[in-house]
Amino acid sequence: MFKNAPDKLLDLATVLLFVFMRPIQALMHRFSRVGDREFFTSNSFPWVAAVEARWPAIRTELDNVLRFKDDLPNFQDISAENRVITNDDKWRTFFFFAWGIEIDSNCARCPITADVLRNIPGMKSALFSIMLPHKYLPPHRGPYAGVLRYHLGLIVPDAERCRIRVGDKTSHWHEGESMIFDDTFEHEVWNDSDGIRVVLFVDIVRPLPFPLAQINMLIIRMISKSSLVQPGLKKFRYWDARLAKVWSKLAEGA
């Protein structure tokens, strides 16, 4: 399919944005207020304990969502850039926020989870990341150093066989426990188990000093308008309509 002129201009603007960001991202690593490393301790983020305390309620909402897992989009269905690391039906998603943009329908379907997310300082993106049995993500890097990645383990069928390598360090998920890492380091992911692994996947603003913090917020707003995000929001509408049909039928007892 050929892109129209506005889409081409959006692509060009996105490329220029990320070229412009390269020296700024280096400064973000250097002056990060929580350090520059692969993994971070939860002690550096006081809100983590409150999130973990509500994990059973989040898990209950997730269990309801999983009844519709065949009607949820794969990651690459929303973000075409991810086709380089996944191109099957084994990495499903349920988005709540994308670069600061709220997905109203999914937040309404899981109000407790949405409330927890809104109370995470600096939360910009969030989803249920649903990895089916024997799914592997090859080495890759996140595009932007202005955010850090938070995971809350929700379903971990086998902690030893569900793992992530970030840089030269490997960690394992546990239900009800948190993991925080910098996804701009090379990382790869395994679910070598026979069950579904699910985490609450959240991007939070990296703590930075003035004026980097203000520059970071401006860049995040620009990314939300870029071709990294906007085409995915358009694709999401199709999947949301599809989910709405089956969700309402089940609610009606059909």
Image (cartoon, rainbow, N blue to C red):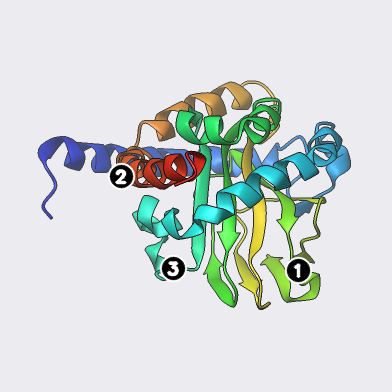
Q: Earlier in the sequence, mark 2 or mark 3?
A: 3
Q: Residues within 10 Å of mark 2 (few under 14, many from 20)?
A: few
Residue 98 on image: x %, y %: 48, 37
Q: Quadrant of the N terminus?
A: bottom left
Task: Name the residue tied to disc 1.
Answer: 170
Secondary element type, mark 1: strand
Spatial separation of the CA atoms under disc 1 and disc 2: 37 Å
Reply above or below: 231 against 211. below
The residue nearer to you, when weighing 98 against 26, is: 98
Task: Name the residue tied to disc 3.
Answer: 89
Residue at point 71% right, 70% down?
A: 162
Reply above or below: 77 against 114. below
Q: Residues within 10 Å of mark 1 (few under 14, many from 20)?
A: some
The residue nearer to you, when weighing 137 against 27, is: 137
Asked which quadrant contains residue 76, the reply is bottom left
Three-letter amino acid code of the residue under disc 1: Thr
The residue nearer to you, when weighing 61 against 100, is: 61
Residue 234 on image: x %, y %: 30, 39
The residue nearer to you, when weighing 84 against 108, is: 108
- Quick check: 57 left or right of 253? right
Spatial separation of the CA atoms under disc 2 and disc 3: 17 Å
- Quick check: 46 left or right of 72? right
Three-letter amino acid code of the residue under disc 2: Tyr
Disc number for residue 238 = 2
Residue 153 seen in the figure: yes
Three-letter amino acid code of the residue under disc 3: Asp
Secondary element type, mark 2: helix
